[in-house]
Amino acid sequence: MTEFDFIRDHLAPLAGPEGLGLTDDAARLTPPAGHDLVLTKDTLVEGVHFPNGMYGADVAERLLRTNLSDLAAKGATPMGYMLSLAIPPLMNDVMMAAFAKGLAAVQDSFPPLKLYGGDTVRIAGPMVVTATLIGKVASGQMVTRSGASIDEDVWVSGHIGEGYMGLLHVLSKRIDPPPTGEALWRWEEAYLRPEPRLSIGGLLRKVASAAADVSDGLVADAGHIAEASGVGMTLRLPDIPFSNGTFIWANGQADRQAAKTKLITAGDDYEIVFTAPKSRRDLIALGASELGVALSRIGYTRKGNGITVLDYADDIIPIISKGYEHF
Amino acid sequence: MTEFDFIRDHLAPLAGPEGLGLTDDAARLTPPAGHDLVLTKDTLVEGVHFPNGMYGADVAERLLRTNLSDLAAKGATPMGYMLSLAIPPLMNDVMMAAFAKGLAAVQDSFPPLKLYGGDTVRIAGPMVVTATLIGKVASGQMVTRSGASIDEDVWVSGHIGEGYMGLLHVLSKRIDPPPTGEALWRWEEAYLRPEPRLSIGGLLRKVASAAADVSDGLVADAGHIAEASGVGMTLRLPDIPFSNGTFIWANGQADRQAAKTKLITAGDDYEIVFTAPKSRRDLIALGASELGVALSRIGYTRKGNGITVLDYADDIIPIISKGYEHF
């Protein structure tokens, strides 16, 4: 399959009108009135951000979903994306078609997301995929990392640690004690098809002073908010939400606290950590219930800097690795 | 140097206000009123799009300049870019700083171009760099590939073949007959620092029915216009502009016509090929003179499809390879 065949047969059907049928080498976007555009760009490298040889639909889903998660943290609504795909020698036509299918599946899940354009090349090396996502948010309403003040609450969506457990499973690591089928399936889904929390965008714009998505690890990404906002942050480990299966796994380890510390620093969660004034607690509880998304209050902002994590006895847990550093 | 050090020390100084100091993982862009946005994305892979081991400023310049060339072909004005950089093991801190210097040099040459954001990762393989350029054009004025009609003129800017000659030189190939120092220097510059023809954007918006930048080869990129527009095209080899040095090289080859055919199919020119109604000839000549850019009339559009190239005697030259296919 040549580049042109791949684009014509598999990518052009995914393009929005902005993509000009992918017969041009540029996209034309008429900006929506009264909105700012939000741009995010993430690159996934085979062997670094996904396991070697994991070609096809799974990579495509992960690429778009993790980028959509960045938009979700901004309170933005996705519009389209530019795609760059460097195809390794072992990726054959079937895998390329599967990759396009993965893109299509995500577009179907998050309308009106469309492909705008991009570039497709060959590489004598690992697969490299990059997406630039374009989203919109009402003018001036984008949620940043830098808006937190002291004496606010820290919240997180969903459950922490499932992406990490899913990665262990995808890498065929032995997981002890053996999880239930349900737990394993949830972990696998969390890793392969993380759910960008776009549904809470409206709530974030209303209540959040700052937000970030949890990609590098809860402690690291909370730390990004703290640093950008010039505040310190204290998180309470007992208040951090784990799913049943993850909780059972952690409590089955010789050092339970070390296991939980691993979970809050491991990354790949794609949940949203955000800060909000205490006055917003009722609004957040109501929003969580209306949207069907768990939102947990896990700590507070304070003077100073950095992240402190407290255990069940309010003693400080030493955090060696705050989370995944890209290099 | 960690990712965070590199971003803080070398990339953050390149960021516009849209980049939020690169402390966030998104950029916020307030769209300019009365304009469409033009998005282009190009990826360069070490060993495919630039020679192995060519790290540093040269890659950065090439990446931005080739992407700016895409915007130039649309008649767009550059605003900013999202950058993705996958850093190979052999690229050290000095090379990374040099890469950032190359970005800075291009930004200085094309104000108000600024860095908006992106992603920096490590790769156990070749260097991969991707830029998504964002430009603007007055609403509805973007020049596409698909607007050519039959019986129009085909034009090209500057000289063809210098990028190819520069590539031979950069790859340390023997060039015979030996060129003058001036020719060699021009070729080298053309390959390493191609000049995006942004200066003719206003003229293109006024006169061009369709345009493309010459990256894959003059014949191939003219072919992209022909295909997208549903027309055929005839080019006359004697009318295709070569610089003195390139012309002398071609005439020094055993098969002169084969050498010139190579030059018009080799790519890396980053000139603009465009179509325009015959009624625009005077306007184009005037524009060329005012802007100080050579614009040569090299052929015409016709019914049918595909590209025909005629020699000095108006006989058809068989073109085996139309140009660089990415794979």
Image (cartoon, coloured by chain):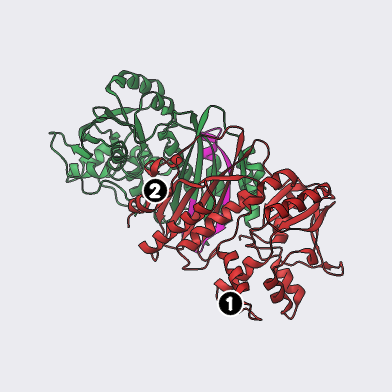
Chain colours: A green, B red
Spatial CA distance of label 1 from label 2 is: 39 Å
Q: Which residue is mark 2?
A: B12
Packing grade of label 2 (10 A; few <14, some 14-19, many >=20) is: many
In this orientation, which residue lies closer to the viewer: B157 or A163?
Answer: B157
- Residue segment shown in magenta: A105-129
- Secondary structure of the residue carrying tag 2 is helix
Query: What chain letter is assigned to the residue under label 1?
Result: B
| Identity of the residue drawn at 54% across and 59% down | B62
Give the farthest residue toward the front: B290
- Badge 1 crowding class, 10 Å Cα cut-off, few under 14, some 14 to 19, many 20 or more, is few
Residue found 30% across the figure and 42% down from its top: A179
Q: Nearer the viewer, residue B279 or A38?
A: B279
* Observer able to see residue B208: yes
Q: Residue at x 35, y 27 (%)?
A: A208
Q: Amino acid at mark 1?
A: Lys
- Considering only vertical position in the picture, is A76 above or below A64? above
Indicate the position of residue B256 as horizontal and vertical percent values: 75, 76
Residue topped by disc 1:
B173
Disc 2 marks a residue whose amino acid type is Ala
Q: Nearer the viewer, residue A228 or A41?
A: A228
Instruction: Find out whether residue A120 is within the magenta segment.
Output: yes
Residue B223 position in % (x across, y down): 73, 56
On-image quarter of the C terminus of chain B: bottom right
